[in-house]
Amino acid sequence: MPKQRNLAIDRFRGVTIMLMVIVNDLADVESIPAFLKHAPAEAGLTIADLVSKFFIFAIAATYLLSFNKRAAREGKSKAYFHFFSRYFAIMGIGALFGEFSSVWTGDTVWSTLQTIGLAGLLTLLVISLPWWARALSGLAVLAAQQTLYHFLPDIFTGEVGAVLGSLGMAACLMLATAMIDLFNKGLKTYLIGAGAVTLAAFAPLLHPDLYVTKQNHVTFILISVAVSCWVYLAFDLISKRVRPTKPGLLCWWGENPMLLYIFHLMLTGAAMALNPRPLGLAIVVDLSILSVLSLIAWALHRKNWQLSL
């Protein structure tokens, strides 16, 4: 593995993608605790909701750095084209999986990959701006989404609603890239920024009539970003003290998180033949999928092959 790889980022991505596999595979099992399932739109936030935001934060951790490196090497126009192609391709792959899922469910599905792809494309529009301008852009997107929901709540249903919901993920990515900029400026600067986001996220909840729901788009995303900031910092501090130069299983997963997520969708699609699954069988299937993906991650690590986000 190249010495310049940041093992904290790899471990953060590795844990995140593992959690995404677990919560996605167990989501339809009735006896699974509620905190492992996505919360209803009107009923708060769970670890399952946060995991996808952790993944967005992990994308942000290398987004601007990768863009700037490619721009310096090939020019800005080629860098923009490369990132446009990358996230458009992710949307296309997501659309294919959505069509495959519709064969089983009978409904057209806007997939997580499509949401990630759209978030990446929208963030590309502001990636060259200073950190504070990206942060303001993210807040503006959130404000626009909240305004739309306030005046036109009926459009936030079905596939159109899923697409509009992707605006929140785009805002999350814009804000996360701004926070990564502050992280790279130093711990003190990052703590101030993370503290400000945390205050902005949780202070409104002191009002007795306001609580966290997915319909409260601004608070929902700000809390997600705030929690991601502190979790990311924890991974960085721990990685500097525990095996700081020795990658392991989490790093193997973190080197190719998007590829492993795509493989996970394939394996999960095959496992649909076993639905409905009782808890015992679901756990066996989940462990089997994790084992297969771990072998793939290990093989890719041995070949020193990484697919950048």
Image (cartoon, grey):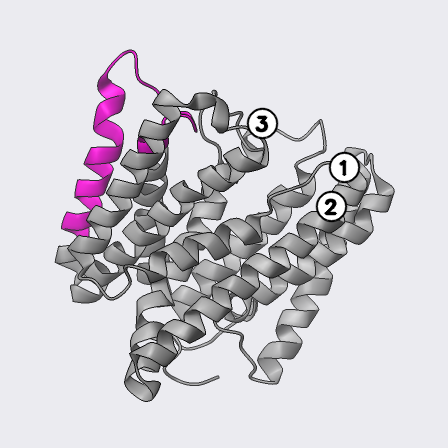
For marks 1 and 2, give the CA distance. Answer: 6 Å
Q: Nearer the viewer, residue 16 or 237?
A: 16
Residue at image position (41%, 26%) is: 215
CB within 8 Å, label 1 to label 2 = yes
Q: Secondary structure at mark 1?
A: helix
CB atoms at circles 3 and 1 under 8 Å apart?
A: no
Question: Which of the two discs, 2 and 3, labels the residue nearer the N terminus?
Answer: 3
Closer to the chain start, of discs 3 and 1, is 3
Amino acid under disc 2: Ser
Image position, residue 204 (x, y; %) = 23, 24
Residue 175 position in % (x across, y down): 28, 50
In the image, residue 297 above or below residue 92: below
User: In the image, is residue 201 part of the stretch drawn in magenta?
Assistant: yes
Residue 52 screen position, x and y as percent = 49, 47
Q: Which residue is mark 1?
A: 105
Which amino acid, by three-letter code, is at mark 3?
Ala
- For the residue pair 124 and 174, the one nearer the viewer reads as 124
The verdict on residue 108 being magenta is no
User: Residue 76: in sight, yes or no?
Assistant: yes
Residue occupying the point 58% across, 78% down: 301
Structural distance between the alpha carbons of marks 2 and 3 = 23 Å
Foreground mark, 3 or 1? 1
Residue 101, disc? 2
Q: Which residues are magenta?
A: 190-219
Q: Which residue is mark 3?
A: 34
